[in-house]
Amino acid sequence: MRIPLTAKEMASPGVHKLMVHQIDRLSHELDEAKIFRDRYYEVDRKRAVLGRQLQVSYAADVAFGVCLAIGPALIGVAPALWERKPYSILLVFFGFALIAGGIGFRMKQYAHH
């Protein structure tokens, strides 16, 4: 709140002391606010990094689940197509490749933690 002071009031030594006191108090409050601002930005950066790591973790979990669902399904379908030799062998190959890829995703995910 601003209180207008007259020239006579500004000449008073008590007003000068109060103004110096207020300046000191505000300077101290500003220093404290700067500390909190720096802490806020530090925590905000850490939150952003952790959020990104969490997104990567979700993607790896989805890749792991998809690979382990489709891989065995391809291997399971292969015997039904056994008379069509190249296709059944390719299904088995891709099924095992997906299983290995899913396990690789999971190993990579835990290697970073």
Image (cartoon, grey):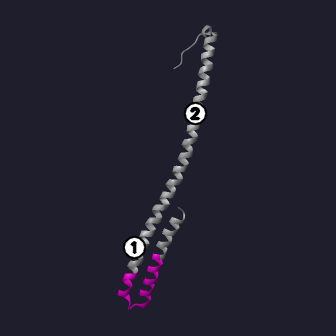
Find disc 1 in the rendering and name its residue: 69
**Is 68 situated left or right of 109 in this image?**
left
Q: Residue at x 40, y 82 (%)?
A: 75
Find disc 2 in the rendering and name its residue: 32
Give the prevailing secondary structure in the magenta stretch: helix
Q: Which mark is residue 53?
A: none
Task: Name the spot of residue 58 as percent of width and height, x first.
Answer: 45, 61
In this orientation, does residue 10 appear?
no
Q: Residue at x 46, y 80 (%)?
A: 96
Residue 88 sits above or below residue 31 on the image: below
Task: Name the spot of residue 33 as percent of width and height, x first.
Answer: 56, 34
Q: Residue at x 62, y 24 (%)?
A: 24
Q: Residue at x 61, y 28 (%)?
A: 27
**Is 8 situated left or right of 85 in this image?**
right
Q: Quadrant of residue 39?
A: top right
Q: Give the residue type that dot 2 points to.
A: Glu
Is disc 1 surrounded by few (<14), some (14 to 19) or many (20+) residues within 10 Å? some
Q: Which residues are magenta?
A: 75-99
In this orientation, does residue 56 appear?
yes
Q: Give the residue type that dot 1 points to.
A: Ala
For label 1, the SS is: helix
**Is 48 situated left or right of 81 in this image?**
right
For label 2, the SS is: helix
Residue extending farthest left: 80
**78 drawn magenta:** yes
Of labels 2 and 1, earlier in sequence is 2
Alpha carbon of mark 2 to alpha carbon of mark 1: how far? 55 Å
Task: Name the spot of residue 17 as percent of width and height, x first.
Answer: 62, 15
Q: Quadrant of residue 85?
A: bottom left
Task: Name the spot of residue 3 as percent of width and height, x first.
Answer: 54, 15
**Is 46 situated left or right of 85 in this image?**
right
